[in-house]
Image: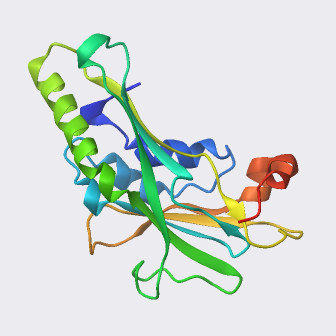
Amino acid sequence: MKNFGQALAPLYASAFLALSACASVNPVGLARLAAMDPLSADPQQISVAARLPQALKLRTGDLVMVLKTNGVEGPDAIDETFSLAVTDAAAGDAGVIAPRDGERLQTARVAPQDLERLRAAQAKARAMKASGKHKGKGSLTVSAKGGCKTAELGEGPLKMNLYMQTQTGGERFPVVNALDLRRALGGETLGKIPPC
């Protein structure tokens, strides 16, 4: 459990690291995430970009973010779930990141209808921390609960790269490099991915 004010931005890192212990995690990206304060970050300016095989696709609602306090009961408790809006990135949308042959580039951010609710949850957590009434421990995570395939996955590695942007117009930095989804998820799980 991390203190909200000192979180290692598990909002993004935990989901990516949980995919596989063998993930090629970028230490520079993790250091930049560690410097981000999830309670003061403007959720409208934060986005994730995924470069993944053309045969795989994320849809809005396939990625969810959960902001939750732990060990807090009653009206002070926070347990909010937010859908991330996923879009195919047009040329230049993701800055210098461009898909290679056989890849697609998608971006995800908190859905517009959830922005005010997330800001309210951040404000509640900040107030709870400032009051000293609670220790302010909690978690902020992103997880994948879906996805689909546009074609058969074939043989060989299925490499995915993940990038973060913490300010609109800011640099996207790598968080996970060349994670082989076939190895991380296994053939049985990949076989259950539905067609789009």
In the image: residue 171, left or right of residue 142: left
> Is residue 92 positioned above or below 104 on the image?
below
x 31%, y 53%: residue: 113
**Nearer-the-camera pick, 160 or 90:** 90
> Is residue 130 positioned above or below 38 on the image?
above
Asked if residue 194 shows in the view, the reply is yes
**Quarter containing the C terminus:** bottom right
Q: Position of residue 23 (x, y in %)?
A: 65, 52
**Quarter containing the N terminus:** top left
Kindly give the residue lying farthest to the right in the view shown.
155
Q: Quadrant of residue 148?
A: bottom right
**Nearer-the-camera pick, 147 or 33:** 147
> Is residue 100 positioned above or below 111 on the image?
below
Q: Quadrant of residue 120?
A: top left
x 65%, y 46%: residue: 19
In the image: residue 6, left or right of residue 90: left
Q: Position of residue 21 (x, y in %)?
A: 67, 43
Q: Position of residue 68 (x, y in %)?
A: 37, 28
x 35%, y 26%: residue: 138
Instruction: Tally the marks.
Output: 0
In the image: residue 132, left or right of residue 171: left
How is the protein colored in the picture?
A: rainbow
**Nearer-the-camera pick, 13 or 85:** 85
Q: Position of residue 43 (x, y in %)?
A: 28, 54
